[in-house]
Image (cartoon, grey):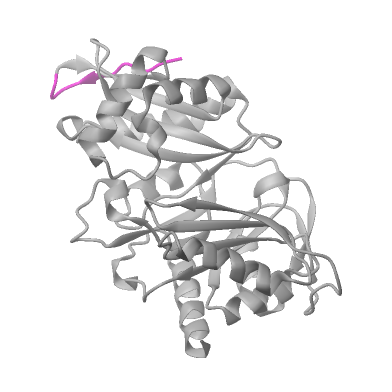
Amino acid sequence: MRETPASETTRQEIEIDFFRIEDAPGIARLFRQVYGEGYPIRIYYLPDQLIEENAAGHIISCVARTPAGEVVGHNALVLLDAATHLYENAAGAVLPSFRGQDIFPRLFRYTIVNTAKRFGVEGIVGEPVCSHTHLQKMCQQLGFKESGLEVDLMPAAAYGMEPGAFSRVSVLIGFFMHRPKVQTIQMPVVYRDELEYLYAGLNIERSFVLSRNDLPAGGGSQGSMKLFELAQVARIAMDCIGADFDSFISHLESQAREKDVVIFHVWLPLASPFASAATVILRGHGYFLGGVLPCWLNGEDGLLMQKVSQEPNWEGIALYSERAKRIGEMISRDWKCVNARV
């Protein structure tokens, strides 16, 4: 399935379609024209690797082309969890000379609507930027459910913006579609009110119990850290919260700081009875609430805790919906509370 409405400005039919092998060099040119060398995910600059990743289903690229085959726009889904067919929407770009022609809204909608039919995608995580509200509006029209706010996530260059206007860009987090299994959530005591609000807007079936306030008597923590060095971001995904959780996090943080990381994310499994204790420890290290994802890895719900290296530019965060605004207030309030204690 493809779309080919005419472009009034260029008098060309811009085709929206899934990736073809011959698109790869054009995608690399597109990213260099839009972002220079500043986009933090390098694969879009590497045609051979992009072809391999699309063939493997690790990336699902959607492309906007002219009749001559020139790539003028791109959007992608990136695989997060093969077991649950969970993807993340990312890597959107349109050539400056083709903007203002409704290309990206069509490309974005095509990605969200058609990948489930073609590739069996069962869940899509979205991160619309908060430097403006245009993408947030598009997400709302496609049933996006907001569930958190990632503060100062990316450098401005990652979105083709001049760093003088925005040093770093915050993004909302949520999902477009999800086939959730029924779960029991171990509610961290400190965030009981916040999580009750977040879950109430997600329309999924959950039961809740208050999580314990202590760590296990023994056993080691297990988790993995992924570094995005150009973006200066570290993401730590916890699989198991053990008795050594405090030192485990401190060790990973030290490794990340050696790579000049300034943004830290820790994802906690909300199926763990020790989520509450881990949350208290993280708050003691300067982490504050980020949000929840009911389609976190392995199909379990996850709680995002985040830490930034300087005071965020709260005034520069533009939020569209009333729910997003309330989430923003919630996150800002918790940042102030945590930093008053640190």
Image coordinates of residue 145 in percent, x first then y, are 54, 51
Specify the segment rendered in magenta.
1-10
- Left or right placement of residue 179 versus residue 340 in this view: right
Q: Residue furthest top?
A: 68
Q: Tell me, yes or no, whether the highlighted magenta stretch contains residue 3.
A: yes
Q: How many marks?
A: 0
Q: Is residue 187 above or below residue 82?
A: below
The kind of secondary structure the magenta stretch mainly shows is loop
Q: Residue drawn 36% across and 37% down?
A: 92
Image coordinates of residue 127 in percent, x first then y, are 45, 50
Q: Residue furthest right?
A: 217
- Left or right placement of residue 142 versus residue 283 in this view: left
- Left or right placement of residue 264 versus residue 248 in this view: left
Image coordinates of residue 120 in percent, x first then y, are 63, 26
Q: Residue drawn 46% across and 14% down?
A: 1
Q: Residue drawn 66% across and 52% down?
A: 294
Q: Residue drawn 62% across and 68% down?
A: 249
Of 14 and 278, which appears nearest the observer?
278
Tell me which corner region of the image, top left, top right, bottom left or bottom right, holds residue 206. bottom right
Q: Tell me, yes or no, whether the highlighted magenta stretch contains residue 188.
A: no
Of 128 and 308, which appears nearest the observer?
308
**Whether residue 138 can be seen here:** yes
Of 251 and 180, which appears nearest the observer?
251
Tell me which corner region of the image, top left, top right, bottom left or bottom right, holds residue 270. bottom right
Image coordinates of residue 257 in percent, x first then y, are 46, 65
Q: Is residue 110 above or below residue 233?
A: above
**Whether residue 197 can be seen here:** no
Of 122 and 41, which appears nearest the observer?
41
